[in-house]
Image: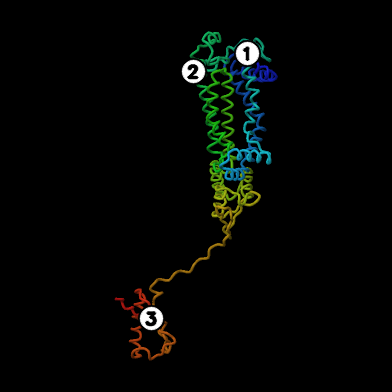
Amino acid sequence: MDTIASLFSFITTPVSWVIVQFHSLYGAIFGPDTGWAWGLSIVSLVILIRICLIPLFVKQIKATRAMQTLQPEMKKIQERYKNDRQRQSEEMMKLYKETGTNPLSSCLPILAQSPFFFALYHVLNSIASNDTIGVINDRLLESAQKAHIFGAPLAAKFTDSSDKVEALGSSIMDVRVVTAIMIVLMSLSQFYTQRQLMTKNVDTTVKTPFMQQQKMLMYVFPVIFAVFGINFPVGVLVYWLTTNVWTMGQQMYVIHNNPTPGSKAQSAYLERLYKHVTHRGKVSRRRDKAIVKAIVAKGRDRNEYERKFINGLTKAGLAAQADGTVVKSETTVVTESEDGTATTTAARRQQPKRQPKSKRQAVPPKPAGGDEKTSLTKSDEPEDSTSTGSTGKSASKSGGARSRAQSGQRKGPQRPKSPSKK
């Protein structure tokens, strides 16, 4: 630990100074020797560090989006070299290098705050060892040793002996109960944050080695925190639990408002956006306009959820524009198939009303002159071909032919049946 402390000694003084400044603020409210004053000082240190790391978080989001644009190419590489894992990994690394993306960019916030974590650990360990460090003098050291969080001293650990804990003014049972609860909460928050990322904000259509790595870390990280957490002082557990809660809330905000394309979070987001747009008839927020603009610009490369969103707007009489706005469209209907091709059709013309069957089968009346023939008599057949030439028999004969035709028999002379072969 002395080696690690020497490596991060350059930052222990700034960290101790920030804690002392926050302690002077909260000490005036809750009292200088209370656990609230020192505990809130550590929480405020976490918040300040995470605010400073927001630019790195934005860079992480951009890198993640760049990784998502490579999903079609990565899927092609997987299909081409599905039987050769080594060649598949080589082609993946080549693609990352050509596009300038880094799959390890998601670790930037963790790597950036690691020096602060070890510096705080060293500060709290010095308090437990009754050693001054940074700007923490003897008076502040004595105040920090008196501070208790839910009955556990700020510098106590789960593995401390009962004599050491009693020297800090507490009991071994209180320390172990408090530290155990905080370790469990710390591990659960880490697991939930990673699981939320893998189940809601990942494009499940493409399986990459990076995704498999993230899935493995989802189970490995909580175990690591649980194992090493028993050696962390209570103040460090407060620091890390606050960090996990901040990360979880920050990720929930990103998933809700800027989801990964092709993920379940995008499907839920587009459903909310569709209801909002169809209710108001326009896109009001700037962030939503940027999402609609990106969807329109994709064209044939839209995924299933994006095609469903565009088709839903079309059925509602709306059309998404290239600038991200939505306008009314009543003259044409544009639908998009699964392959991304758009089909434009005009509005359907109303069909005439169908007549009833009795009117369609009715015999037209005979003309007054009597020279015209009915529709059932052949034009090239002579008039004397009928039996007596009387109108009654002719009508009877034509009516019988029509009834036979309706009953399923063919019109005209029937072919004679061939004699059966003996």
Q: CA distance from mark 1 to mark 2?
A: 23 Å
Residue 313 picture location, percent across and down: 56, 52
Compared to residue 271, the image places residue 183 above or below, namely above
**Residue type indicated by callout 2:** Val
Q: Residues within 10 Å of mark 2 (few under 14, many from 20)?
A: some
Foreground of the two, 67 or 96: 96
**Residue type indicated by callout 1:** Ser
Which of the marked residues, 3 or 2, is nearer the chain's N terminus?
Answer: 2
Q: CA distance from mark 3 to mark 1?
A: 114 Å
Q: CA distance from mark 3 to mark 2?
A: 102 Å
**Pointer 2: what residue?**
177
Residue 65 picture location, percent across and down: 63, 40
Q: Please identify the quarter of the rendering in which residue 378 is found.
A: bottom left
**Pointer 3: what residue?**
412
Q: Nearer the viewer, mark 3 or mark 1?
A: 3
Compared to residue 204, the image places residue 28 above or below, namely above
Q: Are marks 3 and 1 in contact (CB under 8 Å)?
A: no
Which element carries disc 3, helix, strand or loop?
loop
